[in-house]
Every structure is written in C-alpha cells, then in structure tokens.
Amino acid sequence: MIEPLPDLLVAPIVRAALAEDLGRAGDITALACVPADARLTAVFSARRGGVVAGLACARLALAELDPTASFTPMAEDGQVIPAGSALAQVSGNARAILTAERTALNLLGRLCGIATLTQDYVDAIGGTGAKITDTRKTTPGLRALEKYAVRCGGGVNHRFGLDDAILIKDNHVAACGSVGEAVRRAKAFAGHLVKVEVEVDSLVQLQEALAHDPDVIMLDNFTVADLREAVSLVAGRVTLEASGGVTLETVRDIAETGVDVISVGALTHSAKVLDIGLDALSN
C-alpha cells in the first residue's frame, strides 16, 4: 500500500496545469458544442500494461471544475495492471469532464510511466540487496509527484532538494581544492540530522573520502570491476551509491557488485508516458 500524497500538495500543481490549458477564454470547444447541463460518464483506461501512479491528479482535476462530480477508483497507486484495465470511472458535468481530460491524462500518464520504468529497474536487480533511487533530474514543478511515482514503482527517493542533505559533487571539490577538504567543511557545517554524501570518480578519491568519514560515497561512472574493488575497500563502513549512465542492460551487473544504492536519472527524465485514455460510456 503506497501512502498517497496529501491533496494540499497535489492540488496546486493540478490547478496550475488546468490554468495553463484553459488560457484566456476557457475551453471554447466544450462551450460551443456541449450544453451547459449535459452529463457524462467516462472511464480512464490503460492502453498498455504498467504500474498505476497519480490517480489523485485525475480526481483533483475533475473536482476543480465540478466539485459535485463522482470519481470512483478501479485500481490503486502501486498496482500492476494489464493493458485494457480500467483505472477509474468519473461521472458529472460533461463540460467539466471534457475540460479536465487532458490535464488529468497528462499527469496520470506521466506518473504511471515513471512508476512502470522504476519497477522495470527494481525487477532487474531483484535478490541483490541493492535499491533503486531517483535523482533531482525531474520536471520543474513536478518533483514531488515524480518522486512519489518512483515510490509507487518500488524505488526509493534520493534527496528532494538542495536543503535536505549535503551532496558534494565534482565542481564543489574543484572549488574546495580536494575531496578531503570538501568533506571536512561539510561535516563542520552540517547539523546532527544532516547526512553528508560525496561524489568520487576514482579509487584514489574514494580512499581520500573514506579518511574523512562521510555518510555516503557516490561512485560516479565507475566500471563494474572498480565498483567491486570499491565495495571490498569500504567493507561496509559507509553506504555506497553507484551512479552515472545506468541502463536496464547494465543495472544487474552493477547491483551484483554489492553496492547499496543505484541512482538512475532516467527514471524521471526519460520515462515513456503510459498510454491512458478517457472513454465516454454510452447513455
């Protein structure tokens, strides 16, 4: 069971998407063609199998335009569904449903696509003990929703923003002069609840980082052989994260080296939208 995001967080995103679509004059097609008091019942259906995520987006899009409309879920977030499955049935003012349709489908399809791709990665490393995590390579304004979709697909979340963990990257190291100095400064700055992660790109940098006791070390673009050596060298002293160019074809080999976490930017920047449609039912 996936704990849903609160409506308080989702509603402003949905509202902004609706406003973008409505523009300056509203849905002139619905206004022109559909009587003001017309009613409609329709079903959100998956054209392709996948993992459900984002039903609240569809519900809230409709509720914004017709607060009296009914939204009946026929699946739940995190559920694996075959092609042809019904996700939810809606009933209410026809203009409202037709106006909300594209916003609902855009968000629902996007989030289902992320959840589906995430599950593909999670399934690919099954039994290894490693975890799949996302990155901050998210669509601006949609981070909370996209990271929620990753959880629906069985992944875990990396940091949500710049303020909830320290992550020292290569340019931070360049600005500080060395990996060790960057970690030293970070640990002196961080509060007792703030973790410090540092990115390294070689086994030499890894050894330098270890001497300063970070919480997590990111192994950036390491070969599989170097990942194995890194795991042996660290011997469980810190959490190891593998990152950089991870694909479905390579992720199993990476996981089998013994790293703890594998971060995959593709989960959110390259997921294919799951094809979902809204089909009106005959009266």
Image (spheres, rainbow, N blue to C red):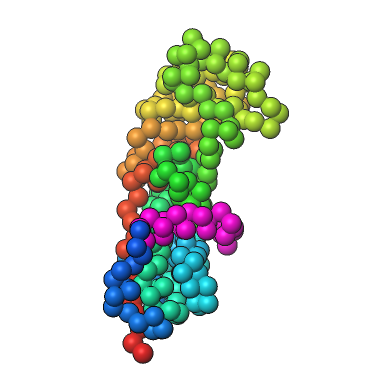
Q: Residue furthest front?
A: 25
The secondary structure making up most of the magenta span is helix
Question: From the viewer's perspective, is 124 left or right of 130?
Answer: left
Pinpoint residue 158: horizontal percent, then vertical percent: 52, 39
Q: Is residue 210 above or below residue 79?
A: above
**The magenta stretch spans residue 217:** no
Q: Residue furthest top?
A: 177
Quadrant location of the C terminus?
A: bottom left
**The magenta stretch spans residue 22:** yes
Residue shown at the point (54%, 16%) measured from the top left: 182
Pinpoint residue 73: horizontal percent, then vertical percent: 50, 73
Residue shown at the point (48%, 19%) measured from the top left: 172
Q: Is residue 19 above or below residue 278?
A: above
Query: Residue 11: in sight, yes or no?
Result: yes
Q: Which residues are magenta?
A: 1-23
Question: From the viewer's perspective, is 263 left or right of 239?
Answer: left
Question: From the viewer's perspective, is 39 left or right of 76?
Answer: left
Q: Is residue 66 above or below residue 169?
A: below
Pinpoint residue 143: horizontal percent, then vertical percent: 47, 46
Residue shown at the point (36%, 38%) measured from the top left: 246
Pinpoint residue 189: horizontal percent, then vertical percent: 65, 20
Quadrant location of the N terminus?
A: bottom right
Q: Quarter of the image holding residue 31?
A: bottom left
Work out whether residue 177 or residue 142 is closer to the camera in this orientation and state it: 142
Work out whether residue 181 or residue 251 is closer to the camera in this orientation and state it: 181
Q: Quarter of the image holding residue 47?
A: bottom left
